């Protein structure tokens, strides 16, 4: 529903013909007829602003004229609809200097569908960007506004009506993700029910990222935190029962709404504020009637403050002012008496600040020129100071579990920490998981809120185990013995002191203390560390000597590992071993592997560990086990008694056997086709059998068990 336009009629009587220059606004000519005003506007950046025109002498008269600039200086104008017979505008939403959308409503209210019209060529042509069969098609349809976050994602909202796309009892809200080619209606279940007779207001919304708010004639504020997919509604705005003119938020929690107490022309202009994102609102007691402009209020991004423009609350001057305390007090930047206007730049109707130094304001074109001059002002005033300064600093924004961080707020007079319930400027927190801490600061009636996120990384939980997999807090060895220690629970590890350790880094180390020693294990995961002490007591009993020689094996082969000197033995890792215990085991590693054998004496008192390296070599001929399929070797594996069948034997035929490091352990010339070998004197393991006749070779594995 079109909102009531108050104080927007241009009173030309008594205006002085002497023109002066503003000290903070630079007037720009919009090149339209005299006495035309900016009804709606949308500033994209310092160079790009769009506006929709209306007749200042007859505010209710429809207009189809838009103005725009893409260079921040020269304005052009055109029409966004064919005539003014059927439609009037609700607002304009600009994406850039070429793309803009306008919401238009049927001014006769006879059920003709409202529309969203779009230009992609800077206003040269306009096309319908809404579906007239489904969107705004009910008898009481009324598009209140359209807003686009970018060239693809937008939202259009209309009053509750009998549209067949919904129940007819909820607000008509549509979303698009392809620039208006297709629209999807927000389900009724996602929108709170309006009260009887409730409708939206033209251009009565504000968007801040994915957050959006819109106001209604019943002094409610509907809010969304997900770009309009779901909505909640506020309690009634105090003091704004007659007319809500606008709403703006300086951050996601703090906002202002403004308007009239009643529908009477003499109604009091009031302001309400929220500190919880629009859920609840309180009345703002304004300390002045002369320093607050009542035509429009906008937020000054990044400065926690707002700017007001227009006829002041007392009706005696046209004002530009800012508030440092969410509307309680207003500081005048410029004032022009209402009785003797020096220039129409002061008659501001809309304002939009882009930052503390740049902004645009729509006003009236000149009444005293044949073709109206001025019409749009660019801010050239002083930099707007930061209001409600509030800072929050953390001694550490990422901590390890069990640690703490000191949070310090500054800039305000009083503080309230909602997460921890403190009212001091400094608090110490010790979260167990990632936590957002919120502090609210107040200074001279101005309230600001800041947050800080404290991330929590896990502190390692260290475990030390022996070769048997038993977790240890202490250990014992006999004199001269070695303890094999394995750590887990972190990413990297450091051991100390280094003197009696085989390695000071890595998850495993051999400790051979000569006296009882306390070692320190430091585990680190990310930036978090944990230190664990570990004491090994050295017993007076001498430790038996563990003998476990390292060996080599060809890739893909098997080798026997032997240990001696103690009574029982265990081996790790066991994945490539034939057994995890015993004095002799078979190993088939794919790569060079360090095994650890741990021996225990017969009394069960002395335990010692030793590394044993199995080096895996790439041996010639292993890839091709046989290049003569007629030669057979059987049995294989064997106990050492082997029969070899060789179909073709000549005087040069020889046979030899090598171990896995290439050492020849048997050699014989071959005279007969069938050869019997006795290799029982060789140790169990893998060998290579080679048969050569001077022209070719046959190589294959030979396993003795």
Image (spheres, rainbow, N blue to C red):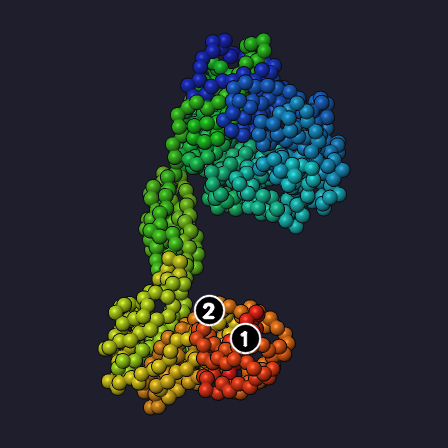
Where is residue 99 shown, x and y percent of the image? 61, 29
Q: Nearer the viewer, residue 651 or 566?
A: 651
Residue at 45% x, 84% y is 683
Q: Quadrant of the N terminus?
A: top right
User: Which secondary structure, mark 1?
Assistant: loop
Find residue 652 and name its label. Answer: 1
Image height check: is 630 above or below 287?
below
Quick one: label 2, few (<14), some, or many (20+) residues within 10 Å? some
Residue at 33% x, 53% y is 406
Find residue 264 and name its label. Answer: none
Where is residue 106 shown, x and y percent of the image? 71, 30
Residue at 43% x, 28% y is 357
> Residue lying furthest bottom in this view?
603
The answer to which quarter of the image holds residue 53 is top right
The disc, 2 or 1, on the residue closer to the chain's N-terminal end is 2
| Left or right placement of residue 36 versus residue 333 in this view | right
Image height check: is 542 above or below 652?
below
Q: Nearer the viewer, residue 103 or 650?
A: 650
The answer to which quarter of the image holds residue 285 is top left
């Amino acid at each position: 529903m079109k909102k009531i336009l108050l104080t927007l009629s241009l009173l030309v009587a008594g205006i002085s013909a002497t023109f002066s220059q503003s000290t903070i606004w630079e007037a720009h000519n919009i090149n339209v007829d005299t006495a035309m005003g900016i009804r709606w506007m949308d500033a994209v950046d310092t160079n790009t602003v769009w506006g929709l025109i209306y007749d200042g002498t007859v505010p209710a008269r429809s207009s189809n004229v838009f103005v725009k600039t893409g260079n921040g200086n020269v304005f052009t104008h055109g029409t966004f609809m064919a005539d003014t017979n059927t439609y009037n505008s609700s607002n304009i939403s600009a994406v850039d200097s070429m793309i803009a959308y306008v919401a238009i409503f049927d001014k006769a209210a006879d059920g003709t569908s409202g529309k969203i019209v779009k230009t992609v060529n800077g206003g040269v042509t306009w096309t319908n960007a809404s579906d007239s069969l489904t969107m705004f098609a009910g008898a009481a349809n009324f598009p209140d506004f359209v807003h686009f976050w970018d060239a693809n994602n937008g939202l259009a909202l209309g009053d509750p009506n009998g549209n067949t796309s919904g129940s007819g009892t909820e607000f008509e809200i549509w979303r698009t993700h392809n620039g208006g080619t297709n629209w999807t209606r927000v389900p009724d279940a996602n929108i709170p029910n309006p009260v009887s007779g409730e409708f939206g207001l033209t251009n009565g919304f504000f968007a801040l990222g994915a957050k959006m708010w819109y106001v209604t004639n019943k002094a409610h504020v509907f809010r969304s935190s997900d770009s309009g997919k779901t909505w909640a509604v506020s309690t009634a705005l105090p003091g704004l029962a007659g007319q809500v003119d606008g709403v703006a938020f300086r951050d996601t929690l703090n906002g202002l709404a403004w308007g009239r107490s009643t529908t009477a022309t003499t109604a009091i202009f009031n302001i309400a504020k929220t500190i919880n994102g629009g859920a609840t609102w309180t009345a703002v007691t304004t300390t002045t009637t002369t320093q607050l402009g009542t035509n429009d209020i906008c937020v000054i991004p990044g400065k926690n403050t707002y700017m007001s423009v227009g006829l002041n609350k007392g009706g005696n001057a046209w004002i530009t002012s800012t508030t440092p305390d969410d509307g309680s007090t207003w500081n005048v930047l410029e004032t022009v008496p209402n009785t003797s206007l020096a220039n129409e730049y002061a008659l501001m109707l809309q304002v939009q600040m882009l930052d503390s130094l740049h902004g645009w304001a729509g006003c009236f074109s000149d009444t005293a020129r044949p073709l109206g001059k001025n019409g749009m002002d660019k801010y050239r005033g002083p930099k707007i100071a930061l209001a409600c300064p509030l800072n929050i600093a953390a001694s550490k924004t990422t901590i390890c579990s069990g640690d703490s961080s000191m949070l310090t707020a500054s800039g305000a007079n009083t503080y309230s920490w909602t997460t921890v319930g403190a009212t001091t400027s400094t608090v110490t927190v010790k979260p167990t998981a990632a936590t957002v801490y919120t502090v609210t600061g107040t200074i001279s009636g101005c309230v600001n809120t800041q947050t800080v996120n404290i991330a929590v990384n896990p502190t390692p939980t260290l475990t030390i185990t022996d070769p048997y997999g038993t977790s240890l807090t202490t250990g014992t060895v006999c004199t001269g013995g070695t303890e094999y220690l394995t750590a887990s629970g972190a990413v990297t590890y450091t051991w100390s002191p280094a003197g009696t350790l085989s390695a000071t880094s890595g998850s495993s180390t051999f400790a051979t203390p000569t006296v009882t020693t306390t070692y320190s294990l430091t585990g680190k995961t990310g930036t978090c560390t944990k230190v664990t002490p570990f004491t090994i007591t050295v017993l007076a009993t001498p430790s038996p000597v563990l003998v476990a020689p390292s060996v080599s094996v060809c890739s893909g082969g098997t080798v026997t590992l032997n240990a001696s000197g103690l009574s029982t033995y265990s081996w790790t890792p066991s994945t490539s071993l034939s057994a995890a215990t015993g004095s002799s085991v078979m190993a088939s590693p794919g790569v060079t592997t360090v095994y650890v054998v741990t021996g225990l004496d017969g009394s069960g008192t002395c335990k010692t560990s030793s590394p044993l390296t199995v080096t895996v070599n790439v041996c010639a001929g292993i890839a091709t086990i046989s290049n003569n399929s007629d030669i057979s070797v059987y049995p294989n594996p064997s106990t050492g008694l082997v029969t070899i069948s060789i179909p073709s034997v000549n005087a040069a035929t020889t046979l030899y056997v090598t171990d896995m490091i290439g050492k020849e352990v048997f050699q014989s010339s071959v005279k007969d086709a069938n050869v019997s070998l006795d290799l029982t004197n060789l140790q169990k393991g893998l060998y290579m059998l080679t048969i050569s006749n001077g022209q070719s070779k046959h190589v294959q594995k030979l396993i003795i068990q």
